[in-house]
Amino acid sequence: MSTQPQEYQAPVWNEPVIMEMGYPGRRGVVFSDVGPDIESRVGPVADLVPAGVRRRQPPALPELSEPEVLYHYLRLSQQTLGMMGVSLFGTCTMKYNPQVNEELAWRPEVTEVHPHQHEDTMQGTLEIVHNADLVLREMSGMDQFVFQAGGGAEAAFTNCAVVRAYHASRGELEQRDEIITTIQTHPCNAATAAAAGFKVITLMLDENGYPSLDALKAAVSDRTAGLMVGNPDDMGVYNPEMKEWVRIVHEAGGLCFYDSANFNGTMSKIRPREIGFDACMFMLHKTFGAPKSGVGGPAVGAYGCSAEVAPFLPAPLVVQDGERYHLDYDRPQSSGKIREFFGNVPVVLKAYAWVRSMGAEQIAQASDLSVLGNNYMEKGLLAIRGITRSHPDATSPRMEMTRYSVQTMKEETGVDVHDVLNRMSDFGVDPAWTSHEPWLVPEPFTPESGEMYGKEALDLWVAVMQRISDEAYSDPQIVKTAPHHQAIHRLRPGVIDDPDTRAMTWRAFRRKTGR
Amino acid sequence: MSASPLPEDGPALGLIVNPVAGMGGSVGLKGTDGPRVLEEARRRGATPQAQERAYVALSRLAELAAPLRLVTGSGELGETPAREAGLDPLVVHRREPGISSAADTRALAETLASRPVDLILFVGGDGTARDVLGAVGDGVPMLGVPAGVKMHSAVFGTNPRNAANLAALFLQRSPRAPLRDAEVMDLDEAAFREDRVSAQLHGYARSPYERHLAQHAKSGGHPGEDGSLAGASRQVAARMRPGCLYLLGPGTTTRRVSEALGVPSTLLGVDAVLDGESVGLDLDERSLLGLTADHETYLVVGVLGGQGSLFGRGNQQLSAAVIRRAGRDRIIVVSSVEKLAALDEPVLRVDTGDDDLDAQLSGYLRIVTGHDRSTVLKIST
């Protein structure tokens, strides 16, 4: 692999959207009539669809032949960048999903299991889920995991539901209506706390890059229901005072939740329970090598907690009773359902396979590599003109990722972070991730090297940044008008920010654009 | 007036350079308001800085925003630095000998507003901002290239190049550079020279700022500054307790609370509300103290300027005596997280003129940032 940037040319197809393609009457598959033999046995075929759900008008679908459909989606796939180059997408912990695990998940023993089956007929499935639970207990120090949540945010919501049930059981829910989080904890924590009916107190950072103990002390009270915090945070900054944080919140009567979605830098090094946390969350599609499948799932947010909090977990739990596995619904203090059934089994299976193939030693090594890779990149990136680091004077180390800023470059050349990201894609490198909102660091970008890529991939990434900086300071228009080699030049900004123009469906698009 | 050849279309930018801006600062005069101070500054050896800062901003603008129709005044009012930066301005105003720089600024601003232009870029400080605002009001958007001694107003770019970057985005009609109401503040220079700080809020200008737009799915879902403030204001209004007096400080944030209540309000004054009704507009300290005598009193204030000022800048009517009547526990601060995140330092400042009160106010204070959303920030003197 070359570590020098090479300009690349994406295929340009200028494909219309599928709804604008096709010809009236064209079909992919033409079915023959059912014929008198079948009709005589089942009656009129159309009557098989109850009258109440039958369409009055045929659906307004595009009319294409099968090869036309295949060409279209092949072309679209060629016009995306995702994971085709080096992709160091901060806070996402991008990992390769081994083909052998995909093969396992497609075996009929997995695909043909139905959650409504009797548990006696899916002992193998339950064994995998239970063993995954045991693995996560070992890594977290917690006493019980549940896999119901379909993603990280749903696991955060699980925590809010559990916190609610816990305080309700003690008659304190009405009084304890506040959840404390931090500005650099993933925003799903604040959002799910609000969705669960809590008031949210968000702590700001001080000069060390994390909120001060005094700010926490000022926020806790007898109204505190809980703390929801990530560590390391969204910038890879590790708060070394977390044990004291947990002590303070416990003293006030709140429960502490560790959003350990960004676990790569600390896995095998710390256990959330040993810091004192009552509960934590892992994203199996992130740290544990299962596919992301697009943000929002299908995925799994594995939520684990201490024995004290476990009675309030959503049901059912997968439990082992001697030789057999059960779905335990008999949980009178349960917070109820978060999602149907007991988890996305194929995702749990892939995560379990990943853990088993890695083993404890290699998991520790993967964690070391992700921290080493990030700090190696930091050395290279901070040597580039126009790039600085968040909280440059803070002594706390950066773990698996670092937040950088091109504010200096913007002031000196007019090239901003979106120009830089656009230009990156000209070299076949996936544009870096910026930051969650609000931007605390101006013109931010946040690479996360992970353990998957070799040193040469990290060198290439840094070399691309060096090249873009050189261009910004010598001929900024090259960067400001990038990308030059992409399927689409520049998107018009703002369209998806404005409720009057953004559209999630074709029908909404036509209504909002008057087409 | 000489009409230079200009591109037929393209955005029109009005340029006003205050040639003497910033001269007082380098020689310790804390401002350059008025001819006598200017004379003293010259006597102390001050040299103009505005031309250089204008040149830096215009050079960046020349790189970023072509075609550009630049409209300005003669010589040091804009023409000279514009030509040095390679731009070809249309001169619509000539300096009159003997006229003050403030009068020049106002006259040029009025001419620009009448043409009209899409944006007035001025090079100066708070005094210049006041003069431009006084001449054009909120009719024409304005943006400042910082070149003054005092810059407490929220209409300035962080440096000349950044101001030019923002101006270019705005002139290109980028949705990343929308307009907002920005505070125009000025200190009383005479008091400032005696080491007394007395800042007045003079009004609100329409000014562009840079907004971060969602680039991909991961950053979506944020309700935005406007929505958060609307929620916060409605909640503050809904939670007002019967029989209690609420004093609403100056600013656009507290104005939203009045709007949520459906009561009249003043933008620059302190207004009073009791049981959902307005009981006083634009009140002075004496009237405020009179009202507080009979009622448990709450203060509702926003955060002023980029320095995070809570009391003592632009809301001096809320004096030490008024604040004492309310008490620390009855101060309701409303601000967007975005505004707090953009503070120079993560602290709020109080300067009530009463050291004991300032000390009592210090420590962490809860700030309402949205519906059921809050944070805590340290108060510093």
Image (cartoon, rainbow, N blue to C red):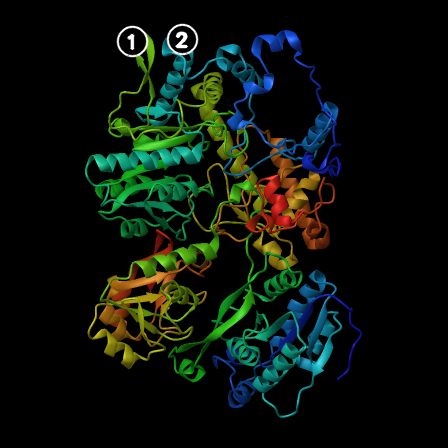
Residue A474 at what x, y percent from top left?
72, 54
* Front residue of A351 and A392: A351
Tell me the residue that label 1 is attached to.
Answer: A322
Q: Is residue A213 above or below residue A339?
A: below
Q: Is residue A162 above or below residue B283?
A: above
* Front residue of A208 and A12: A12
Residue A424 at what x, y percent from top left?
66, 42
Residue at image x 43%, y 43%? A187
Numbered mark located on residue A121 in the image: 2
Left or right: A36, with A351 as reference point:
right
SS of the residue at dot 2? helix
Residue A515 at what x, y percent from top left?
67, 47
Residue at image x 67%, y 64%? B60
Q: Residues within 10 Å of mark 2 (few under 14, many from 20)?
A: few
The reply to whether residue A291 is in sight is no
Q: Is residue A187 above or below residue B1?
A: above
* Front residue of A252 and A392: A252
Q: Is residue A59 above or below residue B154?
A: above
Query: Residue most toward the bottom?
Result: B98
Give me the chain letter of mark 2: A
Amino acid carrying mark 1 in the image: Gly
Sequence-wise, which precedes: disc 2 or disc 1?
Answer: 2
Q: Quadrant of residue A57?
A: top right
Numbered mark located on residue B21 in the image: none
Residue A351 at what x, y percent from top left?
47, 22
